[in-house]
Image (cartoon, rainbow, N blue to C red):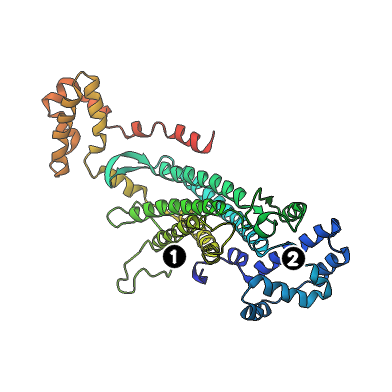
């Protein structure tokens, strides 16, 4: 997590001050619940809220001696609360605080990521409708295939990120659990009602069964979803990078006044934002695997997951937050060149209509094998720059036995390929 790729609101979730504040609230809410159950004096619970405070530097100082972060925190809080602090952490264990706090942070991070996703979806939808009928070439294996529209490209991305939003909502629900169950998760020294109280106060669900730690399959799912979202970011960024290539130039990132593209070549306008997004996506994906490896903790608890999560929690969410916001900006300001799209469509001399000719020949009684051979033998000279596809077909006796001049001209109508665009848009965006 470095400032260059961090946005303040997400970074704030992972600041030590935020973490310790959540720790304090967990402890204070637990004390309130214990006071209601008559386990600790109500005056003690009130004193914890009234006088409870902490200093990050002081916690760090204590931890250097005791080598335990939760004990260091409790010691520092006790310095402010006074004698009533002996009622803090009654029957609790460190994981009750650490795991519940981590899940609060992840759930809050998901709130911001969902907002980011909404901004991206808004940009994709607006630009998709703007270019719903902007015809361009579709490519398979990087090779010209058949016509599509630029709006359909963006609609596909919209549908993908809409699915990702549903996935992220589900991952947020799954991660938002609270465990206040004490050592090895048996509630031996703490009433289960305290867990329910704290969970309600923090907006979490209770963990049905914890083995002192919240089960890490929840976290594995959460970070895996972040990885899927990152992959979707890279897919769309890669498309933009291809479209910006000089020999394609159907779309490009916005190039601002005064922007420089190269230290050596003043003419350059490079796709630096989408290249950056490709790299950031790799980082986020790389954090899904250690989250899955964290599932295999020994017996009721170990801390082999701890060092991993202290890194991937902030890094994955901060990086994805930045990437989603950057991608929304790229799409919002994307410069589109319909005239270049038409020029690229025309580059192969009409070969994009080859399937229509193939199908028309079979409908006219020619076997599929013969029809394929006839169409291909006329297509290959066009690849070599030796004419236009329609002209060659018009001169082919086998073609003309099956198809008239009017038939052939009609088969080269671009509108044929886009006649179901409205149907697809209705499926993606609703009527």
Q: What kind of element bears circle 1?
A: loop
- Counting the numbered discs, the total is 2
Mark 2 surroundings: few (<14), some (14-19) or many (≥20) residues within 10 A: many
Is residue 200 positioned above or below 420 on the image? below
User: Which of these two is toward me, 20 or 160?
Assistant: 20
For residue 131, say whether it is visible: no
Task: Please provide percent x and percent y for residue 265.
Answer: 30, 71
**Left or right relative to 413: residue 177:** right
Check residue 89 in the rendering and tell me which mark sits there, or answer none.
2
Task: Please provide percent x and percent y for residue 314.
Answer: 55, 64
Is residue 5 positioned above or below 387 on the image? below
User: Which residue has dot 1 on it?
Assistant: 256
Mark 1 surroundings: few (<14), some (14-19) or many (≥20) residues within 10 A: few
**Left or right relative to 13: residue 343:** left
Question: Which image quadrant for residue 78?
Answer: bottom right
Camera-side mark, 2 or 1: 2
């Amino acid at each position: 997590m470095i400032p260059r790729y961090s946005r303040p609101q997400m970074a704030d979730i992972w600041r030590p001050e935020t973490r310790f504040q959540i720790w304090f609230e967990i402890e204070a809410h637990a004390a309130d619940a214990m006071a209601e159950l008559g386990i600790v004096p109500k005056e003690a619970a009130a004193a914890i809220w009234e006088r409870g405070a902490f200093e990050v530097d002081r916690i760090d100082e204590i931890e250097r001696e005791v080598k335990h972060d939760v004990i260091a925190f409790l010691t520092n809080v006790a310095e402010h609360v006074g004698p009533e602090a002996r009622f803090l952490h009654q029957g609790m264990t460190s994981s009750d605080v650490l795991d519940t706090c981590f899940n609060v942070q992840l759930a809050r991070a998901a709130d911001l990521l969902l907002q980011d996703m909404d901004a991206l979806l808004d940009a994709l939808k607006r630009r998709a409708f703007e270019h719903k009928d902007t015809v361009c070439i579709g490519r398979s294996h990087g090779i010209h295939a058949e016509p599509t529209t630029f709006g359909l490209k963006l609609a596909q991305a919209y549908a993908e990120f809409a699915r990702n939003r549903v996935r992220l909502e589900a991952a947020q629900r799954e991660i938002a659990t609270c465990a206040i169950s004490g050592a090895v998760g048996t509630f031996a020294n703490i009433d289960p009602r305290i867990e329910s109280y704290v969970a309600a106060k923090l907006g979490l669900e209770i963990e049905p069964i914890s083995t002192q730690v919240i089960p890490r399959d929840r976290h594995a799912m959460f970070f895996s979803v972040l990885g899927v979202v990152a992959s979707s970011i890279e897919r769309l960024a890669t498309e933009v990078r291809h479209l910006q290539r000089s020999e394609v130039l159907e779309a490009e990132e916005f190039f601002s006044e005064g922007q420089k593209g190269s230290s050596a070549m003043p003419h350059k306008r490079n796709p630096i934002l989408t290249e950056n997004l490709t790299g950031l996506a790799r980082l986020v994906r790389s954090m899904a695997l250690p989250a899955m490896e964290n599932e295999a903790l020994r017996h009721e608890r170990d801390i082999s997951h701890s060092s991993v999560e202290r890194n991937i929690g902030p890094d994955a969410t901060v990086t994805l937050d930045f990437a989603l916001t950057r991608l929304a900006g790229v799409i919002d300001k994307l410069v589109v060149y319909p005239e270049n799209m038409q020029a690229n469509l025309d580059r192969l001399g009409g070969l994009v209509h080859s399937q229509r000719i193939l199908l028309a020949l079979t409908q006219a009684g020619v076997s599929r094998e013969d029809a394929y051979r006839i169409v291909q033998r006329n297509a290959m000279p066009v690849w070599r720059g030796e004419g236009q596809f329609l002209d060659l077909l018009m001169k082919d006796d086998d073609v003309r036995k099956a198809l008239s001049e009017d038939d052939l001209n009609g088969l080269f109508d671009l509108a044929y390929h886009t006649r179901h665009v409205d149907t697809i848009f209705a499926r993606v965006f609703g009527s």
